[in-house]
């Protein structure tokens, strides 16, 4: 971070000109000083610039784009119109959409703004009703959003701010063609913010196509790693693997186990429960209600083990995970 961002962190959010009511909301959630990604990007994003921010999951990116969204919509003063959101946040997974909306909701509410989410895996009726009632900020996954666009339930011609969160994960999951089609429907010349852990390949294509003279801020080294993490590789025979995984999962801490396929995640979670280890699974074959319930059980400690496909777990932030096992 620059010396200026250090001064911002020392002076808190007030030094950025954030309204008192939004500072109070942040303080109510235990956030009193900007994280590095926030201190670095907020001066430019609050000024209306296009911003390219690089930081890892859990680095505070959501607040880094939530504050500029709420601020921009408050300044413009345009009223809500049915089916025409005023800000768009694109994310790669349903869980991340819910996570982002939860962080945005109290800030938007303090400014009299409405937030809704759009993603697959659930009936679209409630989402269509929310859009028809008028929303200010739409947090969406590309697939369901394109479905609703085709059906005429939403239009993007009133979008004033567009955000692409976890852009590298979006690229990994093959969403970039859909993202391009969606962003092409938003007005040219409006503010665009892109956040990603890496800025190469497909992400760079998006930057060149949609961001105008963007200011780039990187708060992590390109190959940043957690400083207090020990890595172990176990060379085991196929016959011994299942027992080794069970013994690792049976430890006292909270554990996250990754499998390559949805079937493997379901099977392993069932085997762990049969062995007396409280486990839940997370993958694309589950309904959204079950995904939410399983993730909540892992977050609150009811289940100490989450068995997930790497795609399903992208972008999710859960504190105090003691062990990560790459099963496959």
Image: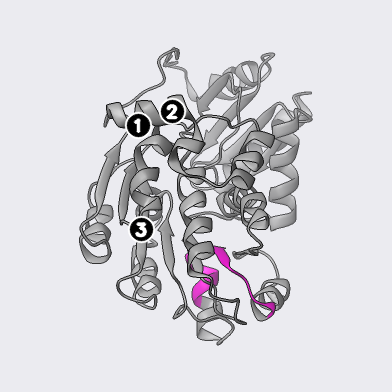
- Rendering coords of residue 206 (x, y %): 27, 60
Q: Name the residue under label 3.
A: 48
Q: In which quarter of the image is the N terminus?
A: top left
Question: Around disc 1, counting alpha carbons within 10 Å, would you say few (fewer than 14), some (14 to 19), or many (20 or more)?
Answer: many
| Residue 314 appears in view | no
Helix, strand or loop at label 1? It is: helix
CB atoms of marks 2 and 1 within 8 Å: yes
Q: Name the residue under label 2.
A: 9
Residue lying at 59% horizontally and 81% vertically, measured from the top left: 83
- Rendering coords of residue 136 (x, y %): 58, 68
Asked if residue 278 lies in the magenta stretch, the reply is no
**Residue 137 sits in quarter:** bottom right
Instruction: Looking at the image, tell me whether mark 3 or mark 1 is earlier in sequence order.
Output: 1
Q: Mark 1 points at which residue?
A: 5
Q: How is the protein colored in the picture?
A: one colour
Is 319 placed left or right of 197 in the picture?
right
Highlighted magenta segment, given as a residue range? 133-146
- Rendering coords of residue 305 (x, y %): 67, 29
Question: Around disc 3, counting alpha carbons within 10 Å, would you say few (fewer than 14), some (14 to 19), or many (20 or more)?
Answer: some
| Residue 94 appears in view | yes
Is 139 placed left or right of 169 in the picture?
right
């Amino acid at each position: 971070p620059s010396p200026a961002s250090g001064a911002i962190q020392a002076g808190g959010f007030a030094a950025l000109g954030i309204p008192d009511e939004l500072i109070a909301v942040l303080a109510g959630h235990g956030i009193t000083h900007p994280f590095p990604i926030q201190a670095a990007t907020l001066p430019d994003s609050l000024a209306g610039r296009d911003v390219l921010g690089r930081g890892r999951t859990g680095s505070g990116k959501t607040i880094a784009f939530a504050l500029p969204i709420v601020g921009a919509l408050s300044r413009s003063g345009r009223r809500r119109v049915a089916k025409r959101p005023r800000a768009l946040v694109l994310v790669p997974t349903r869980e991340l959409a819910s996570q982002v909306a939860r962080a945005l909701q109290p800030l938007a509410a303090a400014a009299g703004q409405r937030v809704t989410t759009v993603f697959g895996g659930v009936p679209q009726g409630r989402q269509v009703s929310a859009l028809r009632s008028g929303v200010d900020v739409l947090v969406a996954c590309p697939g369901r959003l394109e479905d609703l666009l085709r059906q005429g339930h939403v239009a993007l011609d009133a979008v004033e701010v567009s955000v692409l969160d976890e852009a590298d994960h979006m690229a990994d999951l093959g969403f970039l063609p859909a993202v391009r089609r969606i962003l092409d429907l938003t007005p040219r010349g409006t503010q665009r913010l892109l956040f990603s852990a890496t800025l190469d390949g497909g992400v760079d294509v998006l930057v060149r196509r949609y961001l105008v003279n963007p200011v780039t801020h990187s708060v992590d080294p390109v190959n940043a790693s957690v400083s207090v993490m020990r890595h172990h590789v176990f060379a085991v025979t196929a016959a011994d693997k299942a027992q080794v995984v069970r013994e690792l999962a049976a430890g006292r801490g909270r554990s996250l186990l990754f499998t390559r396929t949805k079937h493997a995640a379901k099977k392993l979670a069932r085997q762990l429960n049969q062995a007396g280890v409280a486990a839940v699974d997370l993958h694309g074959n589950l309904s959204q209600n079950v995904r939410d319930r399983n993730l909540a059980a892992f977050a609150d400690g009811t289940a100490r083990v989450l068995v997930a496909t790497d795609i399903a777990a992208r972008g999710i932030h859960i504190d105090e995970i003691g062990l990560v096992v790459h099963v496959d």
